[in-house]
Image (spheres, grey):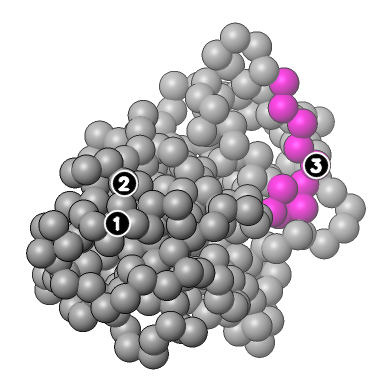
Protein backbone atom coordinates (compact mmCIF):
# COMPACT_ATOMS: atom_id res chain seq x y z
CA UNK A 1 0.00 0.00 0.00
CA UNK A 2 1.30 3.42 -0.90
CA UNK A 3 1.34 6.19 1.68
CA UNK A 4 1.01 9.68 0.28
CA UNK A 5 2.73 12.62 1.92
CA UNK A 6 1.41 15.92 0.64
CA UNK A 7 4.17 18.40 1.49
CA UNK A 8 3.22 21.00 -1.09
CA UNK A 9 3.45 24.52 0.26
CA UNK A 10 5.55 23.44 3.22
CA UNK A 11 8.92 25.02 3.90
CA UNK A 12 12.17 23.18 4.44
CA UNK A 13 12.67 20.95 6.38
CA UNK A 14 9.01 19.91 6.80
CA UNK A 15 8.87 17.75 3.64
CA UNK A 16 11.91 15.80 4.85
CA UNK A 17 10.50 15.35 8.36
CA UNK A 18 7.09 14.19 7.13
CA UNK A 19 8.62 11.80 4.61
CA UNK A 20 10.97 10.38 7.19
CA UNK A 21 8.04 9.74 9.55
CA UNK A 22 6.14 7.96 6.80
CA UNK A 23 9.20 5.84 6.01
CA UNK A 24 9.03 4.35 9.48
CA UNK A 25 5.50 3.07 8.84
CA UNK A 26 5.35 2.24 5.18
CA UNK A 27 7.52 0.60 2.55
CA UNK A 28 6.09 2.57 -0.32
CA UNK A 29 5.61 6.30 -0.25
CA UNK A 30 4.66 9.07 -2.58
CA UNK A 31 5.75 12.54 -1.49
CA UNK A 32 4.39 15.62 -3.23
CA UNK A 33 6.45 18.82 -3.10
CA UNK A 34 6.45 22.08 -5.00
CA UNK A 35 10.05 23.20 -4.85
CA UNK A 36 13.20 21.81 -6.38
CA UNK A 37 15.06 22.19 -3.10
CA UNK A 38 12.49 20.10 -1.26
CA UNK A 39 12.62 17.52 -4.05
CA UNK A 40 16.41 17.15 -3.86
CA UNK A 41 16.44 17.12 -0.06
CA UNK A 42 13.75 14.44 0.23
CA UNK A 43 15.40 12.38 -2.51
CA UNK A 44 18.82 12.61 -0.92
CA UNK A 45 17.51 11.63 2.51
CA UNK A 46 15.71 8.59 1.10
CA UNK A 47 18.69 7.49 -1.00
CA UNK A 48 20.94 7.74 2.03
CA UNK A 49 18.52 5.47 3.88
CA UNK A 50 18.83 2.93 1.06
CA UNK A 51 15.47 3.56 -0.58
CA UNK A 52 14.82 3.58 -4.30
CA UNK A 53 13.87 7.03 -5.51
CA UNK A 54 12.05 8.05 -8.64
CA UNK A 55 11.01 11.64 -9.34
CA UNK A 56 8.22 12.66 -11.67
CA UNK A 57 7.96 16.38 -12.30
CA UNK A 58 5.04 18.28 -13.75
CA UNK A 59 5.18 22.07 -14.02
CA UNK A 60 6.24 23.32 -10.60
CA UNK A 61 5.31 20.17 -8.74
CA UNK A 62 7.24 17.01 -8.08
CA UNK A 63 6.04 13.57 -7.16
CA UNK A 64 8.73 11.53 -5.46
CA UNK A 65 8.09 7.79 -5.50
CA UNK A 66 9.94 6.02 -2.75
CA UNK A 67 10.34 2.28 -2.43
CA UNK A 68 12.11 0.65 0.46
CA UNK A 69 15.26 -1.12 -0.72
CA UNK A 70 16.28 -4.67 0.13
CA UNK A 71 19.82 -3.96 1.07
CA UNK A 72 21.34 -2.15 3.98
CA UNK A 73 21.01 1.62 4.11
CA UNK A 74 23.68 3.43 2.14
CA UNK A 75 24.90 5.48 5.05
CA UNK A 76 22.19 5.74 7.64
CA UNK A 77 23.65 7.22 10.80
CA UNK A 78 21.27 5.09 12.85
CA UNK A 79 22.94 2.00 11.44
CA UNK A 80 26.45 3.25 12.02
CA UNK A 81 27.98 2.21 15.29
CA UNK A 82 30.30 4.37 17.31
CA UNK A 83 33.45 2.69 16.08
CA UNK A 84 32.40 3.06 12.47
CA UNK A 85 31.51 6.69 12.96
CA UNK A 86 35.04 7.37 14.12
CA UNK A 87 36.39 6.08 10.84
CA UNK A 88 33.82 8.04 8.87
CA UNK A 89 34.48 10.77 6.32
CA UNK A 90 36.37 13.99 6.81
CA UNK A 91 34.01 16.96 6.93
CA UNK A 92 35.03 20.59 6.68
CA UNK A 93 32.77 23.14 8.33
CA UNK A 94 32.94 26.75 7.16
CA UNK A 95 31.01 28.99 9.52
CA UNK A 96 32.47 32.33 8.52
CA UNK A 97 33.50 34.11 5.35
CA UNK A 98 36.90 34.87 6.85
CA UNK A 99 39.52 32.61 8.40
CA UNK A 100 40.06 33.11 12.09
CA UNK A 101 39.02 35.98 14.31
CA UNK A 102 40.61 39.39 14.46
CA UNK A 103 41.20 41.49 11.38
CA UNK A 104 38.59 40.88 8.68
CA UNK A 105 40.95 42.04 5.92
CA UNK A 106 43.52 39.50 7.00
CA UNK A 107 40.88 36.81 7.50
CA UNK A 108 39.71 37.43 3.94
CA UNK A 109 43.12 36.80 2.39
CA UNK A 110 43.64 33.76 4.62
CA UNK A 111 40.39 32.16 3.56
CA UNK A 112 41.30 32.74 -0.09
CA UNK A 113 44.68 31.16 0.50
CA UNK A 114 43.07 28.23 2.27
CA UNK A 115 40.65 27.32 -0.52
CA UNK A 116 43.36 27.72 -3.13
CA UNK A 117 45.60 25.36 -1.18
CA UNK A 118 42.83 22.84 -0.53
CA UNK A 119 43.08 21.78 -4.16
CA UNK A 120 46.75 20.91 -3.71
CA UNK A 121 46.92 19.08 -0.39
CA UNK A 122 45.72 15.81 1.09
CA UNK A 123 43.45 14.59 2.49
CA UNK A 124 40.50 16.24 0.82
CA UNK A 125 37.27 16.46 2.79
CA UNK A 126 34.39 14.39 1.51
CA UNK A 127 31.93 17.15 2.34
CA UNK A 128 32.19 20.88 2.95
CA UNK A 129 29.38 22.46 4.93
CA UNK A 130 28.76 26.18 4.79
CA UNK A 131 26.65 27.89 7.40
CA UNK A 132 26.17 31.26 9.04
CA UNK A 133 28.30 33.88 7.21
CA UNK A 134 30.24 31.02 5.63
CA UNK A 135 27.46 30.74 3.00
CA UNK A 136 28.70 34.00 1.47
CA UNK A 137 31.71 32.09 0.15
CA UNK A 138 29.43 29.87 -1.96
CA UNK A 139 27.57 32.77 -3.56
CA UNK A 140 28.16 35.04 -6.54
CA UNK A 141 31.02 37.52 -6.02
CA UNK A 142 32.73 35.18 -3.59
CA UNK A 143 36.52 35.49 -3.84
CA UNK A 144 36.89 31.69 -3.65
CA UNK A 145 34.25 30.67 -6.17
CA UNK A 146 36.71 29.38 -8.80
CA UNK A 147 38.43 27.21 -6.21
CA UNK A 148 35.09 25.85 -4.99
CA UNK A 149 34.08 24.97 -8.55
CA UNK A 150 37.35 23.06 -8.93
CA UNK A 151 36.71 21.19 -5.69
CA UNK A 152 33.15 20.40 -6.70
CA UNK A 153 34.43 18.93 -9.96
CA UNK A 154 36.54 16.59 -7.82
CA UNK A 155 33.29 15.23 -6.36
CA UNK A 156 33.49 17.01 -3.07
CA UNK A 157 29.96 17.46 -1.78
CA UNK A 158 29.06 20.97 -0.71
CA UNK A 159 26.08 21.59 1.53
CA UNK A 160 24.97 25.18 1.96
CA UNK A 161 22.63 26.09 4.80
CA UNK A 162 19.32 27.24 3.29
CA UNK A 163 18.26 29.09 6.42
CA UNK A 164 21.47 31.09 6.28
CA UNK A 165 21.09 31.91 2.58
CA UNK A 166 17.61 33.17 3.35
CA UNK A 167 18.82 35.24 6.29
CA UNK A 168 21.45 37.01 4.20
CA UNK A 169 19.01 37.25 1.25
CA UNK A 170 21.46 35.28 -0.88
CA UNK A 171 19.21 32.40 -1.93
CA UNK A 172 19.16 33.60 -5.54
CA UNK A 173 22.91 34.18 -5.55
CA UNK A 174 24.04 30.68 -4.64
CA UNK A 175 26.71 29.72 -7.17
CA UNK A 176 28.08 26.40 -5.95
CA UNK A 177 26.86 23.47 -3.86
CA UNK A 178 23.43 22.30 -2.77
CA UNK A 179 20.91 24.13 -0.65
CA UNK A 180 20.73 22.03 2.47
CA UNK A 181 18.90 21.82 5.77
CA UNK A 182 19.72 21.14 9.38
CA UNK A 183 18.88 17.44 8.99
CA UNK A 184 21.52 16.88 6.35
CA UNK A 185 23.96 19.15 8.11
CA UNK A 186 23.51 17.54 11.52
CA UNK A 187 23.67 14.02 10.09
CA UNK A 188 26.78 14.81 8.11
CA UNK A 189 28.57 16.34 11.07
CA UNK A 190 27.51 13.59 13.49
CA UNK A 191 28.35 10.85 11.01
CA UNK A 192 31.79 12.25 10.29
CA UNK A 193 35.00 10.56 11.38
CA UNK A 194 36.55 13.98 11.76
CA UNK A 195 35.13 17.48 11.59
CA UNK A 196 37.44 20.36 10.83
CA UNK A 197 36.19 23.84 11.60
CA UNK A 198 37.72 26.56 9.52
CA UNK B 1 48.06 24.53 -19.45
CA UNK B 2 48.26 28.11 -18.26
CA UNK B 3 51.66 29.28 -17.26
CA UNK B 4 51.89 31.41 -14.20
CA UNK B 5 54.41 33.43 -12.29
CA UNK B 6 54.20 34.62 -8.72
CA UNK B 7 55.42 37.77 -7.09
CA UNK B 8 56.50 37.45 -3.45
CA UNK B 9 56.40 40.13 -0.78
CA UNK B 10 58.02 40.92 2.53
CA UNK B 11 54.69 41.31 4.27
CA UNK B 12 51.01 40.54 3.83
CA UNK B 13 50.17 44.23 3.80
CA UNK B 14 52.38 44.72 0.74
CA UNK B 15 50.58 41.84 -0.92
CA UNK B 16 47.22 43.46 -0.19
CA UNK B 17 48.41 46.79 -1.63
CA UNK B 18 49.87 45.09 -4.69
CA UNK B 19 46.63 43.24 -5.35
CA UNK B 20 44.68 46.51 -5.34
CA UNK B 21 47.20 48.23 -7.60
CA UNK B 22 47.26 45.39 -10.13
CA UNK B 23 43.48 45.16 -10.24
CA UNK B 24 43.26 48.94 -10.74
CA UNK B 25 45.42 48.76 -13.85
CA UNK B 26 43.58 45.66 -15.03
CA UNK B 27 46.11 42.88 -14.53
CA UNK B 28 44.26 39.75 -13.41
CA UNK B 29 45.85 38.02 -10.45
CA UNK B 30 45.06 35.67 -7.63
CA UNK B 31 46.26 35.87 -4.07
CA UNK B 32 47.71 32.55 -2.99
CA UNK B 33 49.87 31.33 -0.13
CA UNK B 34 53.55 31.53 -1.04
CA UNK B 35 54.34 28.19 -2.70
CA UNK B 36 56.36 25.87 -0.46
CA UNK B 37 59.18 25.44 -2.92
CA UNK B 38 59.78 29.20 -3.02
CA UNK B 39 59.72 30.00 0.65
CA UNK B 40 58.89 28.31 3.90
CA UNK B 41 57.43 31.44 5.45
CA UNK B 42 53.71 31.83 5.71
CA UNK B 43 53.39 34.81 3.42
CA UNK B 44 50.97 35.50 0.64
CA UNK B 45 51.93 35.85 -3.00
CA UNK B 46 50.15 37.04 -6.12
CA UNK B 47 49.88 34.67 -9.02
CA UNK B 48 49.50 36.07 -12.53
CA UNK B 49 49.79 35.10 -16.16
CA UNK B 50 53.49 34.72 -16.98
CA UNK B 51 53.16 37.01 -20.00
CA UNK B 52 52.36 39.89 -17.64
CA UNK B 53 55.67 39.66 -15.81
CA UNK B 54 57.23 42.91 -17.04
CA UNK B 55 53.92 44.67 -16.65
CA UNK B 56 53.60 43.51 -13.05
CA UNK B 57 57.16 44.44 -12.14
CA UNK B 58 56.84 47.89 -13.69
CA UNK B 59 53.43 48.62 -12.20
CA UNK B 60 54.46 47.66 -8.68
CA UNK B 61 57.67 49.69 -8.97
CA UNK B 62 55.73 52.72 -10.18
CA UNK B 63 53.38 52.42 -7.22
CA UNK B 64 56.31 51.89 -4.85
CA UNK B 65 55.12 48.51 -3.58
CA UNK B 66 58.23 46.62 -2.40
CA UNK B 67 58.49 43.05 -3.66
CA UNK B 68 60.59 40.05 -2.76
CA UNK B 69 61.17 38.67 -6.21
CA UNK B 70 59.19 37.22 -9.09
CA UNK B 71 59.35 33.51 -9.84
CA UNK B 72 57.97 31.25 -12.53
CA UNK B 73 55.66 28.54 -11.22
Q: Is residue A105 visible?
A: no
Q: Residue at x 70, y 63 (%)?
A: A75
Question: Is residue A52 toward the left or the right of residue B33 in the image?
Answer: right
* Residues at marks 2 and 3 on the same chain: no
**For residue B42, above or below residue A151:** below
Q: Residue at x 65, y 39 (%)?
A: A43
> Where residue B56 is drawn, which disc sits there?
1
Question: Is residue A120 toward the left or the right of residue A110 in the image?
Answer: right
- The residue labelled by disc 3 is A52
Q: Earlier in the sequence, mark 1 or mark 2?
A: 2
Quarter of the image where one finds residue B24: top left
Q: Chain of mark 3?
A: A
Q: Residue at x 40, y 37 (%)?
A: A174
> Quarter of the image containing the C terminus of chain A?
bottom left
- The residue labelled by disc 2 is B27
Spatial separation of the CA atoms under disc 1 and disc 2: 8 Å
Q: Nearer the viewer, mark 1 or mark 2?
A: 1
Which region is colored magenta?
A: A47-56
Depth check, front residue: A85 or A69? A85
Q: Position of residue B17 (x, y in %)?
A: 15, 61
Residue A55: in magenta span:
yes
Q: Residues within 10 Å of mark 1 (few under 14, many from 20)?
A: many
Amino acid sequence: MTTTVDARGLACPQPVILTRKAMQQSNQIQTLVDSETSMTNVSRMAKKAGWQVNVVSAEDEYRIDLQKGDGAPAASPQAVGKAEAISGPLVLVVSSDVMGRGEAELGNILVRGFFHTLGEVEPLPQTIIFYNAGVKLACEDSPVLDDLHDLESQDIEMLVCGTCLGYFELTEKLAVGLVSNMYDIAETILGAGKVVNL
Amino acid sequence: MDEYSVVLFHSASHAIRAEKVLLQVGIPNKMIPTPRQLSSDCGMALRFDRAEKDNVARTLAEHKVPINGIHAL
